[in-house]
Each structure stands twice: as structure tokens, then as C-alpha cells.
Amino acid sequence: MQEDLLVEKMRGGRICFVKQSAPDFDVNVIKTLAAERKGIVLLADEKCKKLVDNYKEKGINMTNLAIFSTSQNSHDEVEHVSSLAEASLLMSERINKIKGKQFIVIRTLQGLLKNNKAEISEKFIHYLLTKMRIENIGGFVLSGKVNKKEVAGIIQLFDDVVHV
């Protein structure tokens, strides 16, 4: 099963680009990982409230998650960030505070590109992936609906590309 494969890659510190078509794939991976380690989730799409409610409904250990959102339509358990620069700072602080194993998820690249210039999104992804490698943190970026041209410069930064 692809979920198990991705979880194992992330446990090993791999950073994956996930092209998702299967519903709730990312939710199931987050549930598995949040049961055993702390995680940071950046929600860059408009469905923030719905996603957080879905996480709770699926039984995800919310106490192990720090959730940030670039969406104005946020949730009371989510910390709103107004820019990717602010997200970088807050996520770095959180990474440094967490002791032990952790993971990072960005949902979705489509949302990042929609709300930010491509160059800014690329710099943010590059910075975050570098930080994750230095700290040996596994994670994934969910693609969303993006075309090959939009991801050409970004996709090469990942250890693996997973199609689900």
C-alpha cells in the first residue's frame, strides 16, 4: 500500500513530493505519523476548517500537531500566518522546540503557488527542505492540481516522487 511506503520513507528522513488522486491519502499518513511523533502541517489551501475537522473526525492525535495556515478562513486550532516568510520563522521555531522524531507536511503546492509568486514559493520550499535535511525530518508536499511547468524547478529538490 502506498500509504505504508510513504510512512516508511518519512520515518527514514525522506522528503517526498506526492501526486495525489486518492481521497484522504494524506490524512491517513498524518494519522499514522501523529500517533508516534510530533508534526508540523502547513495548510496552504482554502479548506482549512474542513480539513482540521476531518483530522479530528479521523481520530488524528491533534496534540501532536502544530498546524499553520495561509488561509484567511482559518480554524481556532490553527495558527494563521500572513506570509511564507512568517511561516518559515514559525516553523523553524517549532522544529527547534520539538525534541525527538518529527515530520512536516505541506498541503498543497497548488495552494502555495496560487497565493504566492512562483519564485517565493520555490525559495520557501527550498529553505524548508534544507532545514528538514539538516534536522533529519521526513515529510511530504502534496501536489494538488499543478502542471509540469509549475513544478519543474521544485520537483528535483525532493528525494522521491510518489503517485497515489
Image (cartoon, helix red, strand yellow):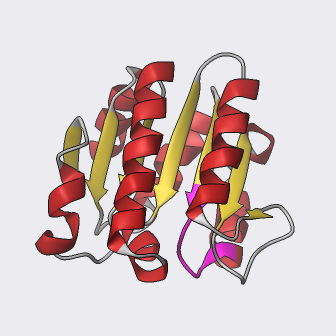
Magenta range: 42-48
Image coords of residue 82 (percent x, y): 69, 71
| Residue 118, above or below 158 | below
Of the pair 124 and 97, the residue shown nearer to us: 124
* Residue 1 in sight here: no
On the picture, is 134 further left or further right than 145?
A: right
* Residue 44 in sight here: yes
Image coords of residue 23 (percent x, y): 40, 68
Quadrant in which residue 163 is drawn: bottom left
Is 44 within the magenta?
A: yes
| Residue 145, above or below 41 | below
Of the pair 93 and 147, the residue shown nearer to us: 93
Which residue does the image show at 39% across and 54% down from the upper left?
A: 123
On the picture, is 33 further left or further right than 111?
A: right
Is 53 within the magenta?
A: no
Which corner quadrant holds the C terminus?
bottom left
| Residue 65, above or below 56 | above
Which residue does the image show at 58% across and 82% down from the upper left?
A: 46
Which residue does the image show at 13% across and 73% down from the upper left?
A: 149
Of the pair 152 and 40, the residue shown nearer to us: 152
